[in-house]
Amino acid sequence: MAPMFSFGKSSYETKLMRLLQEKFFKTARRNKILAQWAGGRLGYKDAAFKSYVRRKILTYLLNPDDEKMISGILSDFKRENVAMSEEVIKKKIQAIEMRVKNRAELGNAS
């Protein structure tokens, strides 16, 4: 008799988990690069730079919302009196996403 419940993962579930994991890591990489870019533009150095990057990454993990991340970074620029627009931040995100995607594709080609 076949078991009533199967706790093994189907190929669909395995593929879905892999895709979700890939998306998570790509987004995490994007956010780290974005936070490093913003921290550098804000003039943070050493411990302040590392702290800023960690804060931005953690904030996104706790509340994964791209618009809130953009507005948070924009607020950081305004607070430090650094000229920056939402459009520039969005273009930077697109460039980073392309870079991360290309890097992932190169890794998969090996």
Image (cartoon, helix red, strand yellow):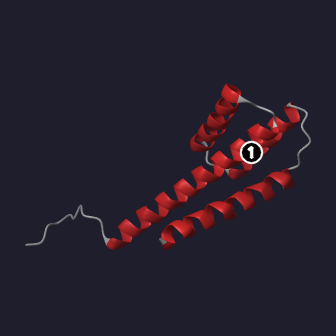
Helix, strand or loop under label 1: helix
Q: Quadrant of residue 6?
A: bottom left
Q: Position of residue 75 (x, y in %)?
A: 82, 37
- Residue under the point 61% across and 48% down: 64
Q: Position of residue 53 (x, y in %)?
A: 66, 37
Crowd band around label 1 with a 10 angstrom C-alpha radius: few (<14), some (14–19), many (20+)? some
- Residue 68 vs 22, above or below: the answer is above
Q: Position of residue 81 (x, y in %)?
A: 91, 33
The residue labelled by disc 1 is 37
Determine the residue located farthest toward the left in the rendered image.
Answer: 1
64 relative position to 77: left or right:
left
The three-letter amino acid code for the residue at tag 1 is: Trp
Numbered marks: total: 1
- Residue under the point 62% across and 60% down: 100
Q: Nearer the viewer, residue 73 or 53?
A: 53
- Residue 43 vs 3, above or below: the answer is above
Q: Nearer the viewer, residue 107 or 33?
A: 107
Determine the residue located farthest toward the front in the rendered image.
Answer: 110
- Residue 16 vs 42, above or below: the answer is below
Q: Position of residue 1 (x, y in %)?
A: 7, 72
Q: Is residue 68 visible?
A: no
- Residue under the point 58% across and 40% down: 62
